Amino acid sequence: MSALQISVEHQRFRLAEVFTIARGSRTHADVLTANLSKNGKTGRGECVPYSRYGESIESVTNQIESLPNEFDRMSLQELLPAGAARNAVDCALWDLEAKLKGVRVWELAGLPVPKPQVSAFTLSLNTPERMRAAAEKHARCPVLKIKLGTPDDMPRLEAVRAGAPESTIIIDANEGWSADIYQELAPHLVRLGVSMVEQPLPAGSDELLGEIERPLPVCADESCHDTSSLPALKGRYDMINIKLDKTGGLTEALALKKQALKEGYRIMVGCMVGSSLAMAPGTLLAQGVEIVDLDGPLLLAEDRDIPLRFDGQVIYPPTADLWG
C-alpha cells in the first residue's frame, strides 16, 4: 500500500451577482480543493475558509499541508480541529475510499441511497426595492432564504413578502440583531409568515435567547459547530444549521445530526458559497431534514466541469465523476 499524496488547490469561482450579508459583500467564491491520492486513485474535497472563524486561504492551506502521509478519517478528527481544513480532507478521504473500493459513499456510511431534495434559494442583503425585484424573479421557489441583520430590516422583509407572496420564507440575520431588535421584529416576522429565523443574535449572546420569548423557531448557525456545541444550545435554540465547513467534514456532521435529533433539535443543512464539489457531501447529510440550503452552485456564474444537477430548486445527488 502506498502512502497518501496530498495537494491543495486555491480556486476562484465568479458569482452570478454580488452577494451581500450583514458582514460585507463578495463577487467571487474562493475555495480550496484537497486532493488525496493513493494506489492510482484520487479523492477530492472542497472547503471555504471563513474569516469569521479566523480562517484564511493561507492558514487552511498550511493546516492541510501539515498532515502526515498516513492517516484515516478517525485519526483525522484528532489531527485537525473542526473547520474548513478538516472538512476538505475528510470529504476527500470519503471520496478516495469510495473510489478504491468501487462503491458509493453512502454505502460506506451505511446510508440509504440519497434522493433529490428541495433547496432554499438565498436572496442577499440589498435595498428593499432590489430585494423585492429579486423576490419577484424567484417567486416560484418553494423556500426563500433572506439575508438580513441590520436595524432597518422591516422594509426589506415587507418588500420580499410582497414580491413572493406564496414562498416559505426563512431569515438569516448573521448575528446582526440585538435582543431588543429581535423582540421588536419577532411579531412582524410571525405576521408575515416567516417560518424560522437563523442566528438573530451574536454567538456570544446565546443566553439571552433563553430569557426572551421565541414566537417562531430559532436556528443556531454561528453558535453550532460540532457535537461539543450542543450543551450550550439547550433551551436557547430550536434548530441547528449543520455545515460541513463548521463540523470539519462529513464524519462529524453525521455524528452531529444523529446526536441533535436524539436531543430533539430540528435540523437544517446549510453551506458556504462554494461549488458543486462542496455541496455534494451535503446532499447525503440533507436526507430527511426539515430545511435544505445547498444553493451555493446556483449563486455562481461558473462551476465545476461536472456539476451537480439542479432542476429548479431540486438538487440531485452527485454522480461518481464529481464526488463519492
Image (cartoon, rainbow, N blue to C red):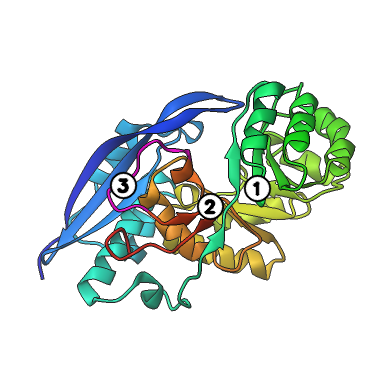
Residue visible at 29% across and 45% down in the picture: 33
Q: Nearer the viewer, residue 9 or 201?
A: 9
* Residue 140's disc number: 1
Q: Nearer the viewer, residue 94 or 119?
A: 119
User: Which mark is first along the chain, 3 or 2?
Assistant: 3
Residue visible at 58% across and 45% down in the picture: 121
* Residue 304's disc number: 3
> Residue 10 at x, y = what percent?
27, 36
Asked if the residues shown at circle 2 and circle 1 are in contact, with their CB atoms under 8 angstroms apart, the answer is yes
* Residue 312's disc number: 2
Residue 262, picture quadrant: bottom right
Magenta highlight range: 299-307
The residue type indicated by label 1 comes to: Arg
Disc 3 secondary structure class: loop
Q: Nearer the viewer, residue 188 or 129?
A: 129
Question: What's the CA distance linking mark 2 and mark 3?
Answer: 18 Å
Residue visible at 55% across and 67% down in the picture: 287
Q: Nearer the viewer, residue 321 or 62?
A: 321
